[in-house]
Amino acid sequence: MSIHTRHNIQIAGRGPATLVFGHGYGCDQSMWRDLIPAFARRYRLVTYDLVGSGGSDLAAYDRDKYATLHGHADDLLEIIDACADGPVVFIGHSVSAMIGLLAANKAPHRFIAQVMVGPSPCYVNDADYVGGFNREDLDALLAAMDRDFLGWTLKMAPMIMGAPDRPELAEDLADRILRNDHAIARHFARVTFLADHRADLPGCQVPTLVVQCTDDVLVPREVSQYMYRRLPRATLRVIDNVGHCPHVSAPSDSSLQIERFLTTVLR
């Protein structure tokens, strides 16, 4: 099985630098559809599905390998080696932002910069750290997913997407989550929401743009402030938007902030 088939890799555009896009939990690469046109004329673009998601090869999902995000980070480095030309900027949404962090820490020479959209190194409140959830609430959320994946998805999708004036976006997100293998999705949810990568932030030497929404039910603004203070080379931009998916619900603002960042790192 080739790496292209394993991850359903798609390549578009041309240019002296490569932008690699990684999607969030329950999603697939099509979530970047409204940002791709803004960059396709100037950059080589690589989109892919995490193993276990979207159009990836589900048979390649190894629960031991993917028991932590490090397995996905290793996949990302393989994708970059196989598909990227020139300097690489990784653009990761939500959990993929942490996958990009781990990959950049392991092989910083492969990245010129990274963009984190709605990232969180830890979703669990801990002493003075505000992650957004108490551990017991997060355990209850995961237990609800185990009991009724359909009901959980239909309830959570509107909260994750936000964009209350565009309910079709939440419907599309729910549909994409439900297309995934439910057993894999439940396993990946635990890996995603119980991970703690706060200790990995100071080791990142790659210039990083953190994009945060003003109102995000999954990631409070305290998280982006925490990351801004601990990432050595961070830039923080806040988008006036409700939800966890600004690249979908506010694509113009998202692409504007990303483009401004790219002009500073790709000179």
Image (tube, rainbow, N blue to C red):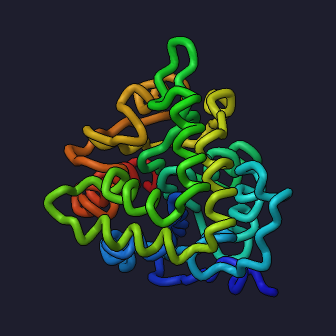
Q: Residue furthest top?
A: 128
Q: Is residue 113 visible?
A: no
Q: Residue furthest right?
A: 64
Count the numbered circles shown.
Answer: 0
Residue at point 51%, 12% (across, down): 128
* Residue 185 image position (x, y, % from top left): 62, 63
- Relative to residue 221, is residue 88 drawn left or right? right
Foreground of the two, 218 or 224:
218
Quadrant of the image for the N terminus?
A: bottom right
Q: Quadrant of residue 74?
A: bottom right
Q: Is residue 52 above or below residue 129?
A: below
Q: Quadrant of residue 87?
A: bottom right
Foreground of the two, 185 or 75:
185
Foreground of the two, 25 or 202:
25
Q: Quadrant of residue 231?
A: top right
* Residue 162 image position (x, y, % from top left): 27, 53
- Relative to residue 106, is residue 217 drawn left or right? left
Foreground of the two, 44 or 22:
22
Q: Residue furthest left?
A: 165
Quadrant of the image for the C terminus?
A: bottom left
- Relative to residue 88, is residue 31 drawn left or right? left
Residue at point 68%, 27% (across, down): 199
Q: Residue furthest front?
A: 147
* Residue 180 image position (x, y, % from top left): 57, 73
Q: Is residue 86 visible?
A: yes
* Residue 120 image position (x, y, % from top left): 51, 39
Residue at point 51%, 33% (across, down): 137
- Relative to residue 159, is residue 20 drawn left or right? right
